[in-house]
């Protein structure tokens, strides 16, 4: 998505143009509409640009991936429960990692893997199931 923002920085005449730019890169209308909430007035009067700086976002993502927190998943500190959502249509969490999470859950009883329908954008494609996972976790508090 960061490359999409770089290739289509705007300005856009309206949200529909921002949606069309994201769709032109092969993303679904649902994802494109969700992404277009990040188009905001900027520069020319009445025109929209992305309020996300793709270079700054990339730096944050790279920093995120520098951290390895498997020790928290495999041995959560007292009082902490870990819930991981795996979108079945996404390759971000592979089968080996999913199995590692399942083993941690069997061992600690405080780690859960929720495998749900959807792709990388599961928060857009299947928000109801994420709401259910969140609500179940809150109910256990």
Image (tube, rainbow, N blue to C red):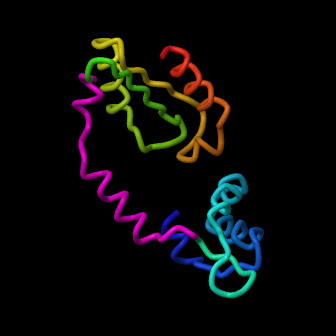
Could you tell me residue 2's position as x and y percent? Answer: 49, 66
Residue in the image at 66% along x and 82% along y: 11
Left or right: 125 as drawn, with respect to 141: right
Q: How many numbered marks does the figure carry?
A: 0
In the figure, 12 relative to 38: above or below?
below
- In terms of image quadrants, where is residue 41? bottom right
- In terms of image quadrants, where is residue 73? top left
Left or right: 83 as drawn, with respect to 14: left
In the figure, 131 relative to 40: above or below?
above
Could you tell me residue 47's position as x and y percent? Answer: 71, 81
Could you tell me residue 7's position as x and y percent? Answer: 55, 77
Q: Residue furthest bottom?
A: 44
Residue in the image at 37% along x and 20% along y: 111
Residue in the image at 38% along x and 21% along y: 81
Indicate whether residue 7 is drawn in magenta: no
User: Which range of residues does the magenta coloring cover?
Assistant: 51-76
Residue in the image at 76% along x and 79% along y: 13
Indicate whether residue 56 is drawn in magenta: yes
In the figure, 98 relative to 17: above or below?
above
In the figure, 109 relative to 10: above or below?
above
């Amino acid at each position: 998505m960061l490359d999409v923002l770089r290739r289509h920085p705007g300005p856009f005449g309206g949200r529909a143009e921002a949606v069309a730019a994201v769709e032109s890169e092969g993303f679904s209308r649902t994802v494109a509409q969700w992404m277009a909430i990040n188009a905001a007035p900027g520069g020319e009067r009445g025109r929209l640009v992305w309020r996300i700086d793709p270079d700054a976002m990339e730096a944050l993502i790279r920093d995120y991936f520098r951290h390895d927190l498997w020790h928290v998943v495999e041995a959560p500190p007292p009082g902490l429960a870990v819930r991981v959502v795996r979108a079945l249509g996404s390759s971000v969490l592979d089968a080996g990692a999913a199995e590692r999470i399942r083993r941690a859950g069997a061992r600690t009883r405080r780690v859960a893997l929720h495998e749900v329908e959807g792709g990388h954008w599961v928060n857009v494609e299947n928000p109801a199931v994420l709401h259910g996972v969140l609500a179940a976790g809150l109910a256990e508090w």
